[in-house]
Image (tube, rainbow, N blue to C red):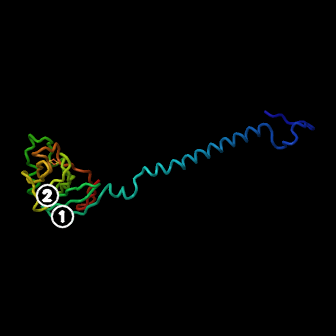
């Protein structure tokens, strides 16, 4: 605590307006100001790195794809590209749906019901990644005239995997069914995959 200088006290001459306390405060201010500047500088330096780690707009666009199915008639199928992979979208007929629902699942290595592979309210659309779960070939069977295998679904020619019309593995080396991706119906005929 500084004491008030007495009249004639030469020790304070030349530092008029600056007591010992002032000196402490000035140093504190310089320290705080430097620290604050340092933090802002660090934040500014870090931001570009954080920003670079966020996916860019074009990557986000590829992360999901919207498909209009209004032109895909029952019995028809289309292939779309999603994250670099083909996705099969099949519009099943009532007969195909019944066949898929009534299939005997006993003995299947990846037993899944038709209900587990489709969404309520949109069960006529079977949506699955068109990549064989054995070693990654692309099965045939979606388009008219393609080989559909022994179970009226999809056939992978690489090593002979047969999938049924709900994409379940029935025969051959593939260990699991064709993958069903995440998807959301935005309307009766518009679906967003991913
Ligand atoms: S990659 Fe399809 S059966 Fe081997």
Who comes first in sequence, dot 1 or dot 2? 1
The residue lying toward the viewer, choosing from 45 and 182, is 45
The residue lying toward the viewer, choosing from 133 and 183, is 133
Query: Looking at the picture, how far across and down is residue 13, in whole percent?
Result: 88, 41
Query: Looking at the picture, how far across and down is residue 112, in whole percent?
Result: 15, 44
The residue lying toward the viewer, choosing from 140 and 119, is 140
The crowding category of the residue bearing disc 2, from other C-alpha atoms within 10 Å (few below 14, some 14 to 19, many at least 20), is: many
Q: Secondary structure at mark 2?
A: loop
Mark 1 highlights which residue? 72
Marks 1,2: beta carbons within 8 A: no
Looking at the rendered image, the quarter that the N terminus falls into is top right
Residue furthest bottom as drawn:
71
Mark 2 highlights which residue? 92
Q: Residue at x 11, y 45 (%)?
A: 172
The image quadrant of residue 65 is bottom left
Q: Residue at x 53, y 49 (%)?
A: 45
The residue lying toward the viewer, choosing from 180 and 70, is 180
Query: Looking at the picture, how far across and down is residue 91, in whole percent?
Result: 16, 59
Disc on res. 26: none
Q: Secondary structure at mark 1?
A: loop
How far apart in space, not on screen, are marks 1 and 2 (Cα)? 10 Å
Does the numbered disc 2 mark a residue whose Cβ is under 8 Å from ligand 1?
no
Q: Is residue 82 rendered to the left or right of residue 23?
A: left
């Amino acid at each position: 605590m500084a004491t008030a200088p007495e009249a004639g006290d030469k020790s304070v001459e030349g530092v008029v307006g600056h007591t010992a306390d002032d000196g402490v405060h000035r140093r504190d201010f310089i320290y705080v100001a430097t620290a604050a500047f340092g933090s802002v500088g660090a934040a500014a330096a870090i931001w570009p790195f954080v920003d670079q780690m966020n996916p860019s707009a074009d990557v986000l666009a590829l992360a999901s794809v919207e498909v209009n199915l209004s032109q895909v008639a029952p019995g028809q199928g289309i292939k779309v590209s999603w994250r670099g992979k083909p996705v099969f979208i099949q519009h099943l007929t009532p007969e195909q749906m019944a066949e898929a629902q009534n299939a005997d699942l006993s003995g299947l290595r990846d037993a899944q019901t038709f209900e587990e592979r489709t969404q309520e309210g949109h069960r006529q659309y079977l949506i699955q990644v068109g990549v064989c779960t054995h070693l990654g070939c692309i099965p045939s069977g979606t388009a008219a005239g393609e080989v559909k295998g022994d179970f009226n679904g999809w056939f992978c020619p690489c090593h002979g995997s047969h999938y049924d019309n709900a994409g379940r593995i029935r025969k051959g080396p593939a260990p699991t069914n064709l993958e069903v991706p995440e998807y959301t119906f935005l309307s009766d005929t518009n679906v967003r995959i991913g």
